[in-house]
Amino acid sequence: MRRLFDPIKLAALGFALLLLGAWQLLADAHLISPIFFPSPLRAFAVLQQRVADGSLWLPLAATSLRMTVGWLLASVIGIALGAAIGSSRLARNLLDPTLEFIRPLPASAVIPVAILFLGLSNKMSVAVIAFGAIWPVLLASVHGFSSVTLELTNVSQVLGFGRWDFLRKIAFPSALPDIVAGLRVSLAIALILTVVTEMQSSLPGLGWDIFSAQRFYRSADLYAGLIMLALLGFAANHLILLLEWRVLRWRDLRT
Amino acid sequence: MRALRTGLTFACLLLFGLPAVAVAEPTKVAIGYPPATDFLAAYVAMDQGIFAKHNIDATMVKIPVVSNIPSAVVSGSIQIGMTTIPVVLQANDGGLDLVLVAGAARHTKEHPFISLLARSDIKYTKPDDLIGKTVGVPGINSVIDVMFRKWLVNNHVPLDKVKVVEGPLPQLPDMLKSASVDYVAIVDPLRTRIVATKTGEIAAEYFAEVNPDVLVSGWLASGDWVKKNPEAVKGFRLAIDEGLDFIRKNPEEAKVIEKKYIGYNSPSFPTFNNKARPEDLTFFLNVGKELHLYRSQLDPKKIVVP
Amino acid sequence: MRRLFLGAIIPASFLIVWEASSRTGLLTLESLSRPSDIVRAGYVALRDGSLLLATLQTCETALIGLAIATVIGIAAGTILGLVPTAERVAGPTIEALRPIPAIAFMPLALMMFGFGVGLEASVVAYACVWPILIVTIAAVRAIEGRLLEVAAVLELPIWKRMTKIVLPAAFERINIGLRVSAAISLVVAVTVEIVLNPRGLGYNLILAEQSLQIGLMWAQLVWLCLLGYVLNLVLSHVGRGPAAIWRPL
């Protein structure tokens, strides 16, 4: 029976407020110029202004959309590649070295190359996001697909499943918990990369707002943007948790 | 034998060490600059030991992302930094106490180095051709961008009908070639390179059209530092004046120094000028007012160090 | 041997196509150097020591940031893992702070530290602390209740409880978090250098770009990939060794 005033939730809120209070005190102490370190009051004031005049929603929508599309692209390719590598030794030998080699590239290094081929467009941003966000879901998928238990593989053989059926009906569901965990991490990375690409390529969105604020020394605007990012990330993470819970419900019943 | 050597060493130390005590400690000055030819006088001053002569212990810090330089100065990472005029105005508008200690280069009608280029397949005839097109600039609100928008205003082209995008400077030529942008407003050496590789042609000398003789770049420092180190400021100015002198007398050697410090040679030297006056800022203040760039009232006399 | 050959097929064909198309004029973008030019530039950079120096600088700051993140992450993670209420109280705040990209704090770090190691290490630490924290909490929570009971029965002091019981049991899981953070540390360090800090591989990268030495820029990118590849290889082997030592009763 959930009580309306759950003390734990209140304590959590209190903890957050405590940190905000600490921020306020630090800002008021003027150890660092307010041009670079604003107080939370100023940052929230900007946020309130943006909600009031409606200028918040467009950048928020743009960033969310880019992040989602990039993440979906990374997920589809990641799961597909993961299925291939996880279930076929040939695929693993062919692809693994190349993938391991390009993985360490930071987005900031990849963006100039992407701009070259895709221009300063949403396509470029989505491509870079997908490139960076694919790794957690890929690694998780590889792990998931290659850990299909012997029993399940035997079942598949007994039922006479071909490769495709095996992957779809046996391997994929078996790998699902790993995959979903990977998806969650990928989403977090996708958000960060969305912001980074927006900063480096003047595409409208939260990242660009933050970058402009930095350029014009408007620290309150900058931190308002960071707060928005925090909230967006928080919301996205919870949505995925919900998805995870729905998708893996059948698993819990078994165990 | 050894005693003699020790004795001689000791004597030398005494002889040469003593005068050093009489002179003041040289001021440590870290100088931040991007790879650009405008600042050749400073490279020369560093290379030829001229800074040391004027009691400045200088270190040159190459900073490729020029928008970082004002913050770097405020944080104390560098004492003197490169700037273009709109940047120092913008910093002051944002509340930073940054002042102009010297100039670096002027852009003149006779020796332009910033122009508007069109892709080779675009036949540009008049400013109105830009309506509906995309123009690439190395930085939004950079001096290149600000002057370009002023040029559009001067030619009655509506600003909202021309799309201005920011691209990394070294990639602008390729962005032009691959049609990500139709025009670029760009500086040498890429300006000359685009024409030489037939990727594009000079469409308009827009910069010179807006102002036939204007101070484009210079050196900034924090107002506080300038107040506390008047000797260093004087020394810096004398050093770059001497550097300029050297460039005039030894252009070939200057080119070698240029390559050493920025990695390439510009097709030609810009019009160097180390003097910065309040009038140089007034022009950009007026442009900024027209383009609604600044939020506060700025006094050029307070921003230029006399 | 066969594995090596198969693995090399994709990169080799890619390089051949690249070299061929730029030699035959199919590929004429200036920002794309030929593989042969890139190799040449890379060789020069290795010989004159600039590449090695930059690598040392980057690794230095990445390591310091990672170390800071590890200490904070494991300490906080252990506490939050052992005290579930604390984790539920701090949890939402952690989930809100985590999505903020570490590089957004660069202007602040610049004002606090100026150019140099402090700036970079602090940003790296912020980025790296979250995976370690989260994994440590999960690892500590998964420790069998019996082990903790044993510790209570033996009336071990807190720090002994941590070093003899909690940490060894949690090590393998924490190790995974460390590997993730290690990769992040390199990426974030290089990013800070590209955008702001004038030292290290990222700085050299953007310098090469701005000085129009594109071959050198590509060589440095390739070097960066090699570095990350080697790092990952080393880490995946290191993880296996110490785990044997730490394996509990």
Image (cartoon, coloured by chain):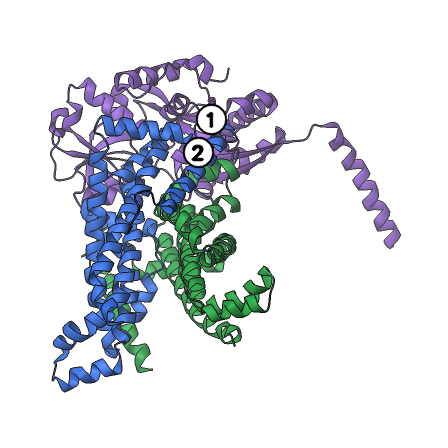
Chain colours: A blue, B purple, C green
* Residue for point 51% across, 22% down: B223
The answer to whether one can see residue B168 in this image is no
Is A190 in front, or is C77? C77
The residue singled out by tag 1 in the image is B220
Residue hosting label 2: B69
Q: Label 1 is placed on what type of residue?
A: Leu
* Residue displayed at 39% across by 15% down: B298
Location of the N terminus of chain C by quadrant is bottom left
Q: CA distance from mark 1 to mark 2?
A: 9 Å
Left or right placement of residue B107 versus residue A151 in this view: right
Q: Chain of mark 1?
A: B
Residue B160's spot in the image, x, y percent? 16, 26
Circle 1 residues within 10 Å: few <14, some 14–19, many ≥20 = many
Q: Are marks 1 and 2 in contact (CB under 8 Å)?
A: yes
- From the viewer's side, name the closer residue of B119 and A153: A153
Q: Is residue C140 above or below residue A3?
A: below
Are there few (<14), some (14-19), or many (20+) residues within 10 Å of tag 2?
many
How many numbered marks does the figure carry? 2
Residue B17 in which image quadrant: top right
Same chain under badges 1 and 2? The reply is yes
The residue shown at (39%, 65%) is: C229
Which badge, 1 or 2, is on the more N-terminal residue? 2
Residue B184 against residue A105 in the figure, above or below: above
